[in-house]
Image (spheres, grey):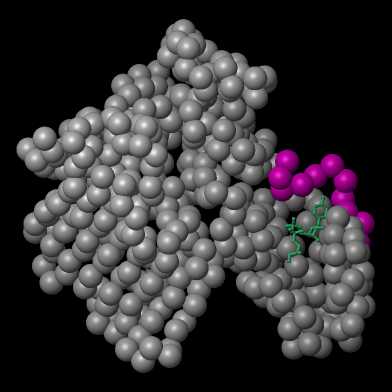
């Protein structure tokens, strides 16, 4: 009996997949098909897969060509499988020609002709109808957004908006991105061109921009904080809901695959009951930066507060008993460094943020059986460890992380707009509204104590 094995994602199953499986089956008497897990696809940089693994397995099964279906979830598995199942022939489509020659040591490698003119990528982009995006603000975030959006299919950046006359970054933007229409006069005209907006303007302008965009029927991804009060934030989410629009707060860490994994490990019971969280995020900003000169809307807490609150909200929830703030302010009332303590029944958390004090910058989640340590920069989660009383016992995790991480939040946003996926569990409206409540409390504290 000749055993054949092939692998694929088989997303949005199409004729090319069908032909490949049929040809693979005809190479022998028994066909094993490896379908990639979500985790493995994320690891190899394929972040646009639409269907979940069980749906994809079902489609392969429905063809009737597979005698056995397995899940491929890690690098190096092909070699293991070939040996474990006693495979004679490994095959994939000719788009991979050469890539798997190293498997010749274990079995015969055959590249089958690829069916022309059809691919999951193409189907995905047709299904998604490219979402036309406009960017509000041409400062630091805009170029990062543009370069990361290239990795997400179904996105077109059409226009950018900045009404501030003479700002240096406007001209730079115009020169660098000739194909993006730069609108400097009318926000309405800018909105008319797009399906969705990404808001990366100064903090205090987010609320108005978000509100107007929603009222014009546009989906919104807004930099944090969406607004400075609970009431305003809730109003915006209610408005989005009423209009059937997607509103996402861009707290990047929440959408990182590695951070999701960290939260899931923490929730799994591995470290026992969670009793304490220490989330630390500091970045020294230059003395003339916006963060250190804008006494009203700058400072460390507004800058990094949402990021440090995410792990606390995700693991301890919103039902806290008491919160206290401690800040070091400069002479103009800018918070340079903060320590926030949140107390729950039987658990507590500390968040530290700073723009003029440098700390270790780690995330520590402490439980009754052990703790999770994610070192700086834990908000771009690439590595974390589970540690125990026995200090020699360390379990490392190395989740995937590509680019500067923005692509994950963009991809989630686009998927939600397209109606796929995945309810927004990563950062919900409730999470954002709760963050706004803490921000509001912080503002009251700051007004009382800063100067
Ligand atoms: N395929 C094809 N013709 C197409 C499209 C795809 O023959 N028009 C083949 C691919 O060459 C592959 C299989 O169908 O052999 C599955 O394709 P994908 O779902 O795109 O999976 P892929 O990313 O190629 O994964 O470990 C995974 C493997 O490396 C292949």
Q: Quadrant of residue 208?
A: top left
Can residue 166 be seen in this snapshot? Answer: yes
Q: Residue 441's x, y, as percent? A: 13, 42
Residue 266 lies in what quarter of the image?
Answer: bottom left
Q: Give the x, y percent position of residue 29.
A: 87, 79
Q: Relative to 325, does residue 287 appear above or below in the rendering?
A: above
Q: Residue furthest top?
A: 185
Residue, x 45% and y 70% (percent of image)? 384
Residue in front for this viewpoint, 428 or 173 = 173
Q: Is residue 350 magenta?
A: no
Residue 62 visible, this angle: no
Q: Nearer the viewer, residue 276 or 331?
A: 331
The foreground one among 353 and 29 is 353
Residue ID at (41%, 78%)? 386
Q: Is residue 434 left or right of residue 214?
A: left
Quadrant containing the N terminus is bottom right
Q: What stretch is highlighted in magenta?
A: 112-122
Q: Is the magenta stretch mostly helix, strand or loop?
A: loop
């Amino acid at each position: 009996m000749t055993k054949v094995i092939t692998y694929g994602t088989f997303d949005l199953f199409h004729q090319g997949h069908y032909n490949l499986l049929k040809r693979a089956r005809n190479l022998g008497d028994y066909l094993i098909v490896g379908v990639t897990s979500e985790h493995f696809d994320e690891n190899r940089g394929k972040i646009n897969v639409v269907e979940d693994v069980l749906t994809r397995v079902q489609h392969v099964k429905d063809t009737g060509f597979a005698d056995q279906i397995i899940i491929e979830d890690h690098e190096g598995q092909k070699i293991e499988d070939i040996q474990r199942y006693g495979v004679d022939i490994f095959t994939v489509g000719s788009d991979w020609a050469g890539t798997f020659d190293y498997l010749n040591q274990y079995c015969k490698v055959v590249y089958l002709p690829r069916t022309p003119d059809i691919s999951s990528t193409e189907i995905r982009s047709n299904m998604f109808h490219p979402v036309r995006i406009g960017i509000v603000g041409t400062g630091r975030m805009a170029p990062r957004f543009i370069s990361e959006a290239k990795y997400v299919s179904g996105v077109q950046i059409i226009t950018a908006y900045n009404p501030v006359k003479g700002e240096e970054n406007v001209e730079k933007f115009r020169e660098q991105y000739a194909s993006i229409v730069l609108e400097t006069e009318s926000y309405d005209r800018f909105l008319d061109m797009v399906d969705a907006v990404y808001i990366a303007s100064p903090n205090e302008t987010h609320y108005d921009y978000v509100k107007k965009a929603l009222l014009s029927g546009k989906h919104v991804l807004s930099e944090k904080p969406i607004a400075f009060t609970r009431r305003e934030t809730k109003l915006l989410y209610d408005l989005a809901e009423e209009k059937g629009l997607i509103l996402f707060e861009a707290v990047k860490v929440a959408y990182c695959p590695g951070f999701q994994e960290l939260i899931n490990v923490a929730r799994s019971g591995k470290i026992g009951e969670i009793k304490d969280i220490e989330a630390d995020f500091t970045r020294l900003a230059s003395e003339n930066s916006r963060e250190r000169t804008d006494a009203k809307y700058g400072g460390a807490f507004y800058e990094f507060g949402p990021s440090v609150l995410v792990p606390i909200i995700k693991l301890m929830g919103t039902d806290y008993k008491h919160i206290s703030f401690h800040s070091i302010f400069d002479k103009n009332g800018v918070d340079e460094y903060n320590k926030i303590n949140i107390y729950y029944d039987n658990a507590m958390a500390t968040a530290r943020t700073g723009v003029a004090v440098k700390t270790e910058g780690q995330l520590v989640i402490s439980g009754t059986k052990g703790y999770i340590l994610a070192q700086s920069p834990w908000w771009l989660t690439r590595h974390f460890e589970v540690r125990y009383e026995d200090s020699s016992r360390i379990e490392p995790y190395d989740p995937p992380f590509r680019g500067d991480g923005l692509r994950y939040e963009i991809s989630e946003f686009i998927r939600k707009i397209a109606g796929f996926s995945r309810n927004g569990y990563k950062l919900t409206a409730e999470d954002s509204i709760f963050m706004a409540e803490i921000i509001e409390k912080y503002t009251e504290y700051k007004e009382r104590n800063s100067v």
